Image (tube, rainbow, N blue to C red):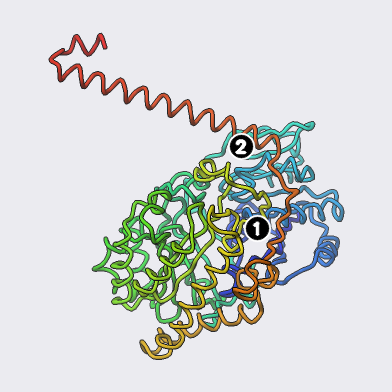
Amino acid sequence: MRILFVHPNYRSGGAEIAGTWPPAWVAYLTGHLRQSGFDDVHFIDAMTDDISDEDLAARMADLKPDVVGVTAITPSIYRAEEVLKLARDTVPGAVRVLGGVHATFMFKQVLSEAPWVDVIVRGEGEEICTELMLAIEDGRWPADRHRIRGLAFLDGGEIVATPAASTVKDLSKIKPDWAILDWSKYIYLPLNTRVAIPNLARGCPFTCSFCSQWKFWRDYRVREPKDVVDEIEDLVENHGVGFFILADEEPTINKKKFVAFCEELIARDLPRRVKWGINTRVTDIYRDKDLLKFYRKAGLVHVSLGTEAAAQMKLDIFNKETKVEENKTAIRLLREADILVEAQFIVGLDNETPETLEETYRMAWDWQPDLANWSMYTPWPFTPLFQELKDQVEIYDFSKYNFVTPIMKPAAMERGELLDGVMNNYRRFYSRKALFHYPWRGTGFRRRYLLGCLYAFLRAGVRRSFYDLGKAGYWGPQTKGTVDFHFDETRTIAEAQLDDWEASADRAAKAAERREAVRAQMKERAAARACGGGDQQMEDA
């Protein structure tokens, strides 16, 4: 059976300005499939190769696959749906499969707007996808589709979701097939080297209200450090990778496993050949302040901190459980350990003003991270914060839900003014860094890395690809009133998805009522005990 995976051609002017990122999802899925005997697996990276729909259709026709599989995050969902529409028209006999975080939670929306999608894989894909492919190979598709957990599909016009599948419990079976990728294409511009995105852990124990990762992966699990370093050694020796970023939301949560991971890297002399970066929380930097130089010895050179917002009020909204003053100290600790630090700010909520944008710039300069990034608040439609703010959401064009387009309109600002304010922060921060910091501070690797980052920014600026500025028509403050984000205002939420949201909201409201009733009962009992009622009075209450 021939399987074709396609990475959809979607660009936003965000993360891709730093280089071309390898689609790790296809390596993890293919690796699991190969363990079950599937050896005729093909991959087309339409994004990296900038493949047109016409060329993609021609390649599909040449390959004649039995299955076409695509994944999508929220902003790439329409492009993913279009890939499967091409498959319907080009190779109509192929089963059309869609996976990823957006389809997992928005399957009713997807199946309503793209009924040509044969089946959606909901959740962590390796085991579900393998079971699905076995059913197709054995001729049990579509007869057995109701028996396979973790799927959603249309059956006679009705949207069906089978019970959720278990998450992958035996992580030792996760053996990605990195050879499926053409590594010459994936370059990290700041270091001009090949880049990979391996995975140490899955899930996150924290429940930040703007994030979907903890919902998608569900339970938090850490792989054996030796297994992960085996992968990294393969990436370095056989694929020429010189830099990797751990895909985890926060790989430092399990301190014991993270330390073991670093020890394994050092034992194999890998830090001499490969450098790496992570995302993590300020609290973990505090916890591990005595280990930061050890982490640097293991090759860790870049830490992106989710400082999120300059105003403590915003941190509380996001449920980040951190304090503003902790951010500055964490950045200083990292710099002292010779680890480059990037501060992430979220902007564009309803209460954003020119003054709060200015505050984030002043704090960024006061904290002195090596890099700063201002991301537009993007209300993933399946997160708790979206449910709280959905009455303020005016745009349902998910292709713009990309962290660089202002989906939310602040009460006191127009979207063009918000974009201009963010660009003003970037201009000031990086101009001062370029003139007074990057060329003169640090030695060797640090200077080279930072100048490489500056090159990536300038390259994207010249190409007008940074923040999609060329498409939006932004050329500076004089154009902030004429910026056009080209929202597709015909996009709406499907009735089936609205019904699902309302049902979920009702369940959440009833659960909240039950919790409140229990709390009230406990207060009554405590009051009765305080009044000297004794056990009998408690039972009566």
Residue matched to label 2: 149
Q: Along the polypeptide, which appears first: circle 2 or circle 1? A: 2
**Label 1 environment density (alpha carbons within 10 Å; few <14, some 14–19, many ≥20):** many
Amino acid type indicated by mark 2: Arg
Q: Secondary structure at mark 1?
A: helix
**Residue drawn 53% across the image and 47% down it:** 216
Q: Are marks 2 and 1 in contact (CB under 8 Å)?
A: no
Amino acid type indicated by mark 1: Lys
Residue 321 position, x and y percent, is 34, 51
Residue 150 position, x and y percent, is 61, 39
**Residue drawn 49% across the image and 31% down it:** 508
The answer to which image quadrant residue 462 occupies is bottom right
Residue 34 position, x and y percent, is 63, 56
The answer to which image quadrant residue 55 occupies is bottom right
Q: Nearer the viewer, residue 193 or 314?
A: 314
Q: Nearer the viewer, residue 115 or 12?
A: 12
**Label 2 environment density (alpha carbons within 10 Å; few <14, some 14–19, many ≥20):** some
